[in-house]
Each structure stands twice: as C-alpha cells, then as structure tokens.
Amino acid sequence: MSPSDLHALRNELDALASGLGFAAIGVAHLDLAEDETHLLHWLGEGRHGDMHYMARHGTRRSRPAELKPGTVCAISVRLNYWPCEAADPEAVLNAPDLGYVSRYALGRDYHKILRNALQDFADRIEAKIGPFGYRVFVDSGPVLEKALARNAGLGWIGKHTNLIAKDAGSWFFLGEIYTDLPLPIDPPVGAHCGTCEACIPACPTGAITAPWQLDARRCISYLTIELPGSIPEALRPLIGNRIYGCDDCQLVCPWNKFAQAAAHPDLKAVRHGLDQAPLAELFLWTAEEFESRLRGSAIRRIGHERWLRNIAVALGNGPQTGHSADRARWSLSQRAQDPSPLVREHVEWALDRLDRRDRSGSN
C-alpha cells in the first residue's frame, strides 16, 4: 500500500472501530526500550511473585516483532466496562458480610467479548485491503498493553500503573492488533495526574509502594486471582471482603468521574447477584455450582479451590458478633474437613480470627 493509501485507511479505522463498540483506538509505535528497562528491573526484584510466565517471556513482552515477526506497529483499542447498574462499590465494601467482586468481572468474560470484536475489526480491515499480517491479543500473550496504549495516545499511565484517559477514567479494557501494515502513528497524550497521589494510600495492602511502582506480591488482585497457594497471613486481614480482585485505587481516582458506562450488553449485565452477594451463601457453592453458575465468567478461571480460599479469608474478616458472625462460623465449619489442604488452612485461620476478635472485642 502507498503512503496515501495507508493514511486513508487510518482515517477509516475510527469509524470501523466505533461500529464494533470500541470507545477509542490508536496506532502505536513499538519503541518500548524505557518500559523494558522498568520491566526487567521489576522482574529482577521479584515483584511478579509466582507469575513465573512473566520472567519466561523475557523481552518478547517489550519487543513485539520478536513475538510476531514482521510487526511494525500496534493498533490499540479501548472498550468501556463500567457496570453502572451494579450495586455501589463503596456500599458493598462497607458491608463486611457481602463479597466484593472487581467491577470488571461482574458480567461475561471480557476475553471472549473483546477478542471476538478485535477479530471482527481485523476481518473488516482485510475486506477493505486484502490479506495482511496481523495477530490479535487480549491478555493472550506477552504484551505491554498499557505502554502500547500510551504510545497510541489512548491515555497515560497513572501512578497506580493503570491507564487513564481524560474522557473516560480507567474503567476500560485494552486489546491489541500487531500488524505489518506501516500505518501512521498517533501522537501520545500528556500525563495529567499532577500532584494527586490518592491511589497510593487507598491501596489496602500497600501494594503501590511509590508512584508508578507496584509490588504484585501485595496486590489483592494478584493474591485473589493469580496466586495459586496460601495467601500470606499478614495480608489476610487487609483484604477485607474482597473475594475477586480489587478496585480501590480506581475508586478514588478523580478522573473516574468521567467513566463511561459499558456499551456491550454482556458487560452491562450483573450475573448471579455478584455485585452484592452474601459471603456465607457463596461459600456453600459446590464445585458443580461454581462451574455452572460462573460459566462464561472470568471468575471461573481461578477454580473452585481458590474461590473458597478467598471467601474463607473474607468471612474471617467479617463481623465477629451477631447473626452475620454466627452464619459465617456455621458456613466455615461446613468446610472444616474440606478435601483441599489449602481451603482447610484458610478456614481454620478464619474461625480462629473470628474467635480472637470476639474475645478481644476488636476489629
């Protein structure tokens, strides 16, 4: 394609993307040298915890052409997911007998929704220009998606390490198309966090150790989703009632007053009342109920064992007296002999914590 043809194609991409539900797109250059230095330092300090795949991928994450030979740029897209019809997050976090699920996971699994939309996007480009080299990514490979989205002008990386857009806050998913089309590159936007550091003290576990510095080993999203084994005891009380992910750093971000509601119907919907579900009830789900109720949900990926582990911790952090405490103790006792050593350990911790807090009258 000639340079004029490529410019004309770039001008058509916004309309194509909008027709598929994307809130914004941009084309990014592939210079990620500074991000690679940061990544390697982060890995060298072990801040990725048990996410060993991040170290195995090495520089393929920061060098797109090593991952997909022939890649000369990346098309980055943004898909809003804020579920405005869900229960108020702060209200749920302040109700210790309810389980808090990260807002992105209340609807259907975004991986499938976004990947299908990206594939449709690539198909429409191909229908216009003929076959071209590309590969679609939605958390499906070693990609520095936030850095590429920044390069594509979709926003800036905030001090909590999430991407922020001036017109949409941070409640959105990112996806990429690596391509061999030398499309015109979009300019980046400036950063607008200024002196604000609200996200840093808002982190319940102190995982944001400094501006733009995240220790995943302390992050509740890592602890409840990525970590396969036992949650460190010192961090369990800090998790509160968060049973899948954490949104605290985004909830306090001033830019999220501009958050845009999810447009896709499968992201709008709240499945099985997970926006404000009683912990004691969730803890009684059998493995079969977990599989059937969460079919098509991102939560299903962690499996029933981690689900129970997380809820046991939340139950242990709940009220120590009253009906809710009695219900929590009863639910926990039902799994005191669970076949999983991981579940049994966290149940024992939760029961002991409830008893100790009851005796001391403290929280």
Image (cartoon, rainbow, N blue to C red):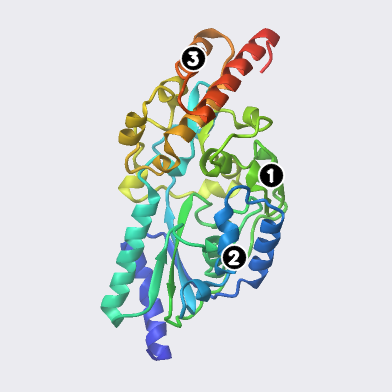
Q: Are marks 3 and 1 in contact (CB under 8 Å)?
A: no
Q: Nearer the viewer, residue 20 or 349?
A: 349
At a point 33% along the width and 65% down the height, the residue shown is: 119
- Marker disc for residue 339: none
Q: Position of residue 345 (x, y in %)?
A: 57, 25
- The residue that mark 2 highlights is 58
- Marker disc for residue 333: 3
- The residue sitting at the left extreme is 127
How far apart in space, not on screen, are marks 3 and 2 (Cα)? Answer: 45 Å
- Marker disc for residue 200: 1
At a point 63% along the width and 55% down the height, the residue shown is: 158
Which kind of residue does numbered mark 3 sit on? Ser
Asked if residue 215 can be seen in this view, the reply is: yes
Which kind of residue does numbered mark 2 sit on? Gly
- Quarter of the image with the C terminus is top right
Q: Are marks 1 and 2 in contact (CB under 8 Å)?
A: no
- Quarter of the image with the N terminus is bottom left
At a point 36% along the width and 59% down the height, the residue shown is: 115
Q: Position of residue 16 (x, y in %)?
A: 33, 69
Which kind of residue does numbered mark 1 sit on? Ile
